[in-house]
Structure formats: structure tokens, C-alpha cells
């Protein structure tokens, strides 16, 4: 299940390696070769591994490529290769729901931010970040014209890249044409929690009725898959129309959307 070391590495870009995962593999080869051949210079290692000596030099002198550093941080946090039945997977998928429905991941720094809503409090969002082991702060709370956001205070860039490796988009989300595959990898109870979080962020809260309407600017394939998830986790009626979903009052109650 994503994120894996491979999928995380591919959220990085590199001027030399079209596939950053290959850079990770080359770095590991250099470090492993050097560990088994003490007092070996860059030229020798480069020839042995068919790599440019200048590239090898930095790695022998403890320079660490960005993808490797990110992978190491994610390993330390326990975020890579989560067991689908684990608490880590459940926590990551829960946070993924908050980001997809009420947040964003900027393409320039990958640090996720989530905005509280009518049904979703800042405290709940902070708890979702804390569940994956990350502390947060609130941004823009006193800035007129700016949405209040909950953002991580540490390892935010690596966490954001892990969420992207799981299927979250960077920048605008309007082109997202399907739900991340990990939503189907986890147990039904986690998928239900994902759906509940998404609807609580995006569902319109009508004053005179309990029906909830989810309207998002997404391709029809995304809307269809979101309905598939809802149909999978609740028995009551959900309908699709006009680029959105209508969740009956009974379905909203069953899902736990107040």
C-alpha cells in the first residue's frame, strides 16, 4: 500500500534522473559498495558502478539526495508501506480525506493545509494530523480575507509528499478524476470514516432539511467513484445528478453526518 519508498521518491524532480527512484537506487549502491571497500576513492567506485566520479564524490562525502532524505524521514515516522489493516494506514487515509475535501497541497512546498468548516472544527483537523504523529499550528486566523488553515509544524513537506504518493493532487484539485486507490485498500470501516469526513467537509448544510448535497468541481468519474464508496459503506439512498451527490436524510444519519 502506498506510500512506498518508490512512490515517495517520484514526488521529487531531478535534473539528471528522469526517474528519481533510480537516483535512490544509485545512491544506495554507492553507499553499500563504499561500506564494503574501505579507503576507496570516487574514481574507483565510479568505475566499479559505472557512475560519474563527480556524482559519486558527494555521496561518499555524506551528501544525501533529497528523495533519500525524504524516504528516511518517512521511515522514521512509520509512514511507508503501511499495513492496510494498521492504525497508521487508517490515520493516513483519514488525513487524506481532510486534505482532499477541505485542504490543499501546494506544488512548491508540498506542505498540506486544511481549512475548518461548518461541520469540521480546527480541533478535529489538528487531531487528524496528530494521529499521524505531526504537531500543527493555525495560520491566517486573524488575517482578513484569508481562510484559517491548520498546517503541520514539522516534517510537513515529507507528509505532504506521502499524501501525494497516496493519490492526493498538488495545486488545484479540479482535474482529479478518481479517488486515490488506497481508499479501496483499507478495511470498510476506514473507508466509511473517509466518506464521512469527506461529506462533512463538502456537504451543504441546509437549515430546513436533513438532506445533504455534495457539489464539487470534479470530472464525472470522480463523482461516480465517490458514490461507489458511499454505496459501499451505507445502505440508505445516495443519488447522482448535476455534477454532485444528493445524500438523503436517512443516509446522512446512517453515515453520522449531523
Image (tube, helix red, strand yellow):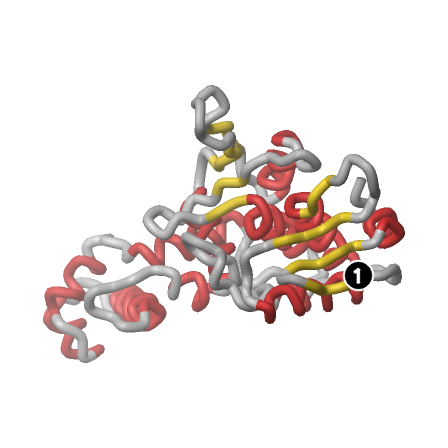
The residue positioned 79% from the left and 65% from the top of the image is: 231
Residue 73 at x, y percent in the picture? 43, 49
Query: From the viewer's perspective, is 63 left or right of 158?
Result: left
Mark 1 burial class by Cα count in 10 Å: few <14, some 14-19, many 20+: many
Decide: is 17 above or below 157. Answer: below
Could you tell me if residue 141 is visible in this image? Answer: yes
Query: From the viewer's perspective, is 188 left or right of 142?
Result: right
Residue 228 at x, y percent in the picture? 73, 68
Which one is in front, 66 or 253? 253
The residue positioned 88% from the left and 59% from the top of the image is: 236
Residue 170 at x, y percent in the picture? 43, 55
Q: List the residue tagged with mark 1.
A: 238
Could you tell me if residue 36 is visible in this image? Answer: no
Query: From the viewer's perspective, is 164 left or right of 232?
Result: left
Which one is in front, 206 or 80? 206
**Dot 1: element:** strand
Amino acid at each position: 500500500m502506498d506510500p512506498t519508498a518508490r512512490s515517495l521518491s517520484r514526488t521529487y524532480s531531478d535534473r539528471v534522473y528522469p526517474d528519481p527512484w533510480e537516483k535512490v537506487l544509485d545512491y544506495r549502491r554507492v553507499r553499500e559498495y563504499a561500506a564494503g571497500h574501505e579507503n576507496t576513492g570516487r574514481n574507483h567506485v565510479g568505475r566499479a558502478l559505472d557512475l560519474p566520479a563527480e556524482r559519486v564524490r558527494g555521496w561518499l562525502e555524506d551528501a544525501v539526495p533529497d528523495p533519500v532524505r525524504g524516504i528516511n524521514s518517512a521511515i522514521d515516522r512509520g509512514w511507508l508501506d503501511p499495513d492496510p489493516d494498521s492504525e497508521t494506514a487508517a490515520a493516513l487515509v483519514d488525513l487524506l480525506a481532510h486534505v482532499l475535501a477541505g485542504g490543499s497541497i501546494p506544488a512548491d512546498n508540498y506542505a498540506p493545509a486544511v481549512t475548518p468548516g461548518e461541520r469540521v472544527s480546527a480541533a478535529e483537523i489538528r487531531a487528524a494530523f496528530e494521529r499521524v504523529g505531526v504537531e500543527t499550528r493555525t495560520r491566517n486566523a486573524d488575517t482578513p480575507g484569508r481562510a484559517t488553515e491548520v498546517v503541520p509544524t514539522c516534517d510537513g513537506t515529507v507528509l505532504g509528499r506521502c499524501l501525494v504518493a497516496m493519490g492526493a493532487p498538488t495545486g488545484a484539485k479540479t482535474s482529479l478524476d478518481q479517488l486515490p486507490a488506497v481508499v479501496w485498500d483499507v478495511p470498510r470501516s476506514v473507508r466509511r470514516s473517509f466518506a464521512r469526513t469527506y461529506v462533512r467537509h463538502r456537504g451543504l448544510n441546509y437549515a430546513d432539511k436533513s438532506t445533504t448535497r455534495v457539489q464539487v468541481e470534479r470530472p464525472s468519474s470522480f463523482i461516480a467513484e465517490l458514490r461507489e464508496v458511499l454505496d459501499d459503506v451505507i445502505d440508505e439512498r445516495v443519488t447522482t445528478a448535476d455534477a454532485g451527490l444528493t445524500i438523503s436524510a436517512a443516509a446522512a444519519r446512517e453515515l453520522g453526518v449531523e
